[in-house]
Image: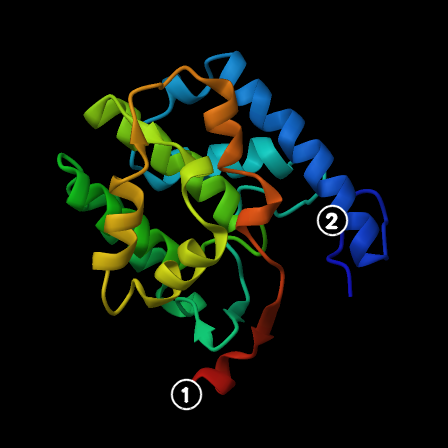
């Protein structure tokens, strides 16, 4: 089933196409208009602004913390009852070194604060932190999609793999729009969220 959206689209494939077209256009605006440079790097408030800007034309929940428990494949993201506490903790995590930044990124992925669009908005959020703290960003074109997805899946237990992948893809081309846009390319995410009731998480 398609998520409830402002266009009234009920076909998942049509919604995915519409979402991709609009979110990519909005992502370009974030970059070109310098909106990202005005955000407080590393804070959840910055991620919420990114998510709201990308998906606000499509979903009412854009930029709003989810109120359902979700999972993807066999991994269940942070339960709703602990989500705000998790986000407050992430806000306070250090981000002065590459390792600290990726650890923060991994924790935000575990939190998965939104109903949809977490990967794309969080990759932009990651680049905002890297750009501010290290003067670098990720060149996503250098990272294999399957390697990335597997590394992210394993990262809550062991983050060495994702750190290795991302470190080898660092570039100082922080003003290159093509490199930036690769981060929200649809080849880097897949759908397949499962919604759980709170009692099913016990």
Q: Are marks 1 and 2 in contact (CB under 8 Å)?
A: no
* Residue 3 sits above or below residue 57 on the image: below
State the residue in front, 187 or 30. 187
Identity of the residue drawn at 26% across and 44% down: 91
Q: Residue 184: which quarter of the image? A: top right
Placement of 186 over or under 152, stated as above or below = above
Residue 60 located left or right of residue 91: right
Closer to viewer: mark 1 or mark 2? 2
- Give the quarter of the image for residue 197: bottom right
Which residue bears the numbered disc 2?
16
Residue 73 in picture, x, y percent from top left: 52, 73
Query: Closest to the observer: 7 or 73?
Result: 73
> Element at badge 2?
helix
Which residue is painted at 24% across and 21% down in the image?
A: 135
The residue singled out by tag 1 in the image is 202
Provide residue 122's location: percent of width, then percent of height: 43, 43
**Whether residue 109 is situated above or below residue 120 in the rendered picture:** below
Q: CA distance from mark 1 to mark 2?
A: 32 Å
Name the disc covering residue 152, or none: none
Where is residue 68 drawn, in percent x and y?
A: 55, 67
Residue 164 in the image, given as x and y percentages of width and height: 24, 49
Left or right: residue 48 versus residue 56 is left
Mark 1: give few (<14), some (14-19) or many (20+) Cα within 10 Å: few
**Residue shown at 43% from the left, 22% from the top:** 36
Q: Is residue 89 toward the left or the right of residue 183 in the image?
A: left
Q: Is residue 154 visible?
A: yes
Left or right of 193 on screen, residue 105: left
Which residue is most to the top?
A: 33
Numbered disc 1: secondary structure: loop
């Amino acid at each position: 089933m398609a998520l409830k959206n402002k266009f009234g689209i009920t076909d998942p494939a049509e919604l995915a196409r519409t979402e991709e077209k609009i979110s990519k256009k909005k992502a370009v605006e974030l970059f070109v208009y310098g909106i990202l440079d005005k955000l407080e790097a590393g804070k959840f408030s910055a991620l919420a602004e990114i998510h709201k800007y990308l998906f606000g034309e499509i979903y009412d929940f854009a930029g709003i913390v989810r109120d359902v428990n979700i999972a993807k494949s066999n991994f269940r993201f942070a339960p709703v009852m602990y989500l705000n506490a998790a986000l407050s903790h992430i806000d306070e995590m250090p981000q002065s070194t590459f390792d600290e930044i990726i650890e923060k990124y991994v924790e935000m992925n575990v939190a998965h604060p939104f109903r949809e669009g977490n990967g794309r908005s969080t990759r932009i959020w990651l680049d905002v932190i890297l750009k501010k703290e290290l003067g670098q960003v990720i060149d996503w074109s250098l990272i294999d999609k399957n390697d990335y997805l597997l590394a992210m899946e394993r990262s809550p237990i062991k983050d060495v793999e994702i750190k290795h992948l991302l470190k080898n893809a660092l570039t100082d081309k922080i003003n290159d729009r093509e490199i930036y846009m690769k981060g929200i390319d649809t080849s880097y995410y897949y759908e397949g969220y499962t919604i759980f009731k709170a009692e099913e998480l016990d």
